[in-house]
Image (spheres, rainbow, N blue to C red):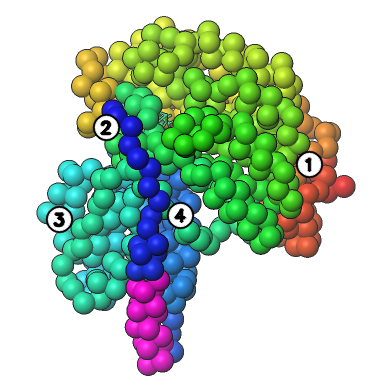
Amino acid sequence: MGERKQVEISVEELEKQEYYIREVRKINDEQYGNTGRHKKHLTITYGCQMNEHDSEKMNFMLSQMGYAPSDNIKEADIVIFNTCAVRENAELKVYGKLGHMKSIKRIKPDVKIMVCGCMMQQQHVIDEIKKSHRHVDAVFGTHNYHKLPEFIYESYGSEKTIVDVWNIDGQVVEGLRSIRKFDTKAYVNITYGCNNFCTYCIVPYTRGRERSRKPQDIISEIEMLAKDGVKEVTLLGQNVNSYGKTLEMEYSFAQLIRDVNEIDGIERIRFMTSHPKDLSDELIYAIRDCDKVCNYLHLPVQSGSSRVLSKMNRHYTKEQYLELVAKIRKEIPDIAFTTDIIVGFPGETEEDFQDTLDVLRQVRYDSAFTFIYSKRSGTPAAEMPDQIDEGIKHERLERLMSLVNDISAQINETYRGETVEVLVEGPSKTDKTRLMGRTPQSKLVNFEGSEELVGKLVNVRIDDPKTFSLNGIVL
Ligand code: 5AD
Ligand code: SF4
């Protein structure tokens, strides 16, 4: 694959966006004048943080156009599905929801239905929507969601499904603002796309080739966020460790986090995802030296078997991965690791699977995202022989999850009686009268406290550790 020139989205493109925002706003304001009711939107997001952040940016455009947020699919005037293509299950859910929307649209013909995100970057999905889901108003992709206002505007005057999916992947969209879920923490894109072509993964095809944002754009955005009260940033990329490779200047991810560490007001820096093959010593030292960088690393292993890792095109062996973890732990003893693991990759034997369990026992992850291999058409692994029986995949997943959870519970138990530093995020999900926040190691902590603590760093003594969270008392 040749080098591609990286271009930023043109000023005209953003001016066009502003024009359409104003036009839709006029329509919505007029309707508000007639009915006294604000139009509402619901954005349903599947998949990774990248998608979540894209949705946050669309939600900002929607609020500028005068839509109020809603969590009721029947009440919303516009429903946007931001989709994920990584596994078949997520795709099936979207088709199910689109089926459901058909009956809603029969009762409420004015409701606008839009589908975007990774699924839409695949031609067979577009064909399926055109054929079986003609009630969809607009389909767009991962590269051009900044055009949402234009799609909404056009959909008001047309019954046809608008299809606008860009295949160019040299584009970096700058200047989009977002509505954050939390006031205290924010996502910041640093790279888009992926060049790794792990043989099971659809992402390089749906999000295109890797390109890095300019350091100055990233730093200015974080400075603005800090002024806005944000305390924690998570730098996002499919593989943050290769940040900088497409820049004209010499500048690495390690340098970026050292520079972000200097920004006043930011208290915590996180990042994801780190590909083990690109994790440099320079980065390990930067994590160790920068006081704001959390001692937490999401380091997907995918499999513990060197044979399977090679077939996955991961570029490391079991031994190299374990050595890397040991090297990081030597420099940063209290670092917590989490990971992604796939079971049932084509040709995976019981022995390969035992290697995965072995890595788990040796690394002792704080937690792990565990997945059953899902065949993605167009990826090399989909064509590999010896696809694994569904029953075996499920049985392996059960065993894997049980070990992951045992280890999580054991690690959490070591926190009993310990005091941890928590950045308070807001009310607890399970009990709204309590607060929740996270430790630098990304442990979820629930405790009693007043709302004024939101956005602050507090010390909490853990008195009741659970498998997936810690309960404690503010000191
Ligand atoms: N099947 C199962 N899991 C997958 N992932 C990516 N592609 C697939 C697939 N085809 C997992 C990987 C990746 C995470 C985001 O999703 O573990 O790290
Ligand atoms: Fe997919 Fe591999 Fe790229 Fe991650 S690094 S997005 S798993 S191809």
Q: What is the CA distance from the residue labelled 3 to the residue labelled 1? A: 51 Å
Please tell me in which quadrant of the rendered image residue 452 appears. Answer: bottom right
Range of magenta residues: 18-34
Secondary structure beneath label 1: strand
Q: What is the CA distance from the residue labelled 2 to the residue labelled 1? A: 41 Å
Quick check: 353 above or below 30? above
Residue lying at 51% horizontally and 23% vertically, measured from the top left: 278
Residue 134: x, y in percent? 16, 61
Nearest to N terminus: mark 3 or mark 1: 3
- Examine the rendering and report whether any part of residue 4 can be seen: yes
Please tell me in which quadrant of the rendered image residue 156 appears. Answer: bottom left
Nearest to N terminus: mark 2 or mark 1: 2
The total number of labels drawn is 4
Labels 1, 4: front one: 4
Q: Which residue is mark 1?
A: 421
Disc 2 C-beta below 8 A from ligand 1: yes
Residue lying at 79% horizontally and 32% vertically, measured from the top left: 416
Residue 376 marker: 2
Nearest to N terminus: mark 2 or mark 4: 4
